[in-house]
Image (cartoon, grey):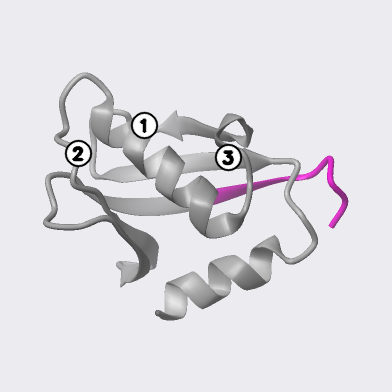
Amino acid sequence: MSLNESITIEVHATPGAKRNLVGGQHDGRLRVSVTAAADKGKANAAIIKLLADALGVSKSSIELISGATNRQKKFRITGASSDMRDKLQNLMQC
């Protein structure tokens, strides 16, 4: 995978959780829990930060492309590194 490629990932979000956590699956989607409330985009911003930290990319390379007000979300990651798919697979299996 070249650095110009992008990856689309599907996420099942849980806002207002007791702790921030990324890993596991829910209906084939990456499970992401954040302590931020689902209020005025706070949870979406927290999910982007958590994904960026977990995948080793900048927050600006992650874009919410659908599901802004839904638990089922899609994100596009641009400038993905060659091991991004492996990192995602590992997170899905946690």
- Dot 3: few (<14), some (14–19), or many (≥20) neighbours within 10 Å? some
Q: Earlier in the sequence, mark 3 or mark 1?
A: 1
CA separation, marks 3 and 2?
21 Å
Specify start and end residues of the magenta stretch as a single range: 1-9
Residue topped by disc 3: 76
Q: Residue 44 lies in what quarter of the image?
A: top left
Label 3: which secondary element: strand
Amino acid type indicated by mark 1: Ala
Magenta segment includes 90: no
Label 1: which secondary element: helix
Q: Is residue 39 above or below residue 81?
A: above
Please tell me which residue is depicted at 32% across the width and 29% down the height of the picture. 68
Residue 67 visible? The answer is: no
Point out residue 13 in the picture as x, y percentages from the top left corner. Answer: 27, 49
CA separation, marks 3 and 1?
14 Å
Residue topped by disc 2: 36
Q: Residue 43 lies in what quarter of the image?
A: top left
In the shown orientation, is residue 90 left or right of residue 74? right
Residue nearest the observer in this picture, 8 or 40: 40
Residue 45: numbered disc: 1
Label 2–label 1 contact, CB within 8 A: yes
From this viewpoint, which residue is outermost toward the top? Answer: 40
Point out residue 36 in the picture as x, y percentages from the top left corner. Answer: 19, 38
| Mark 3 or mark 2, whichever is nearer to me | 2
Please tell me which residue is depicted at 53% across the width and 46% down the height of the picture. 52
Q: Is residue 37 above or below residue 28?
A: above
Amino acid type indicated by mark 3: Arg
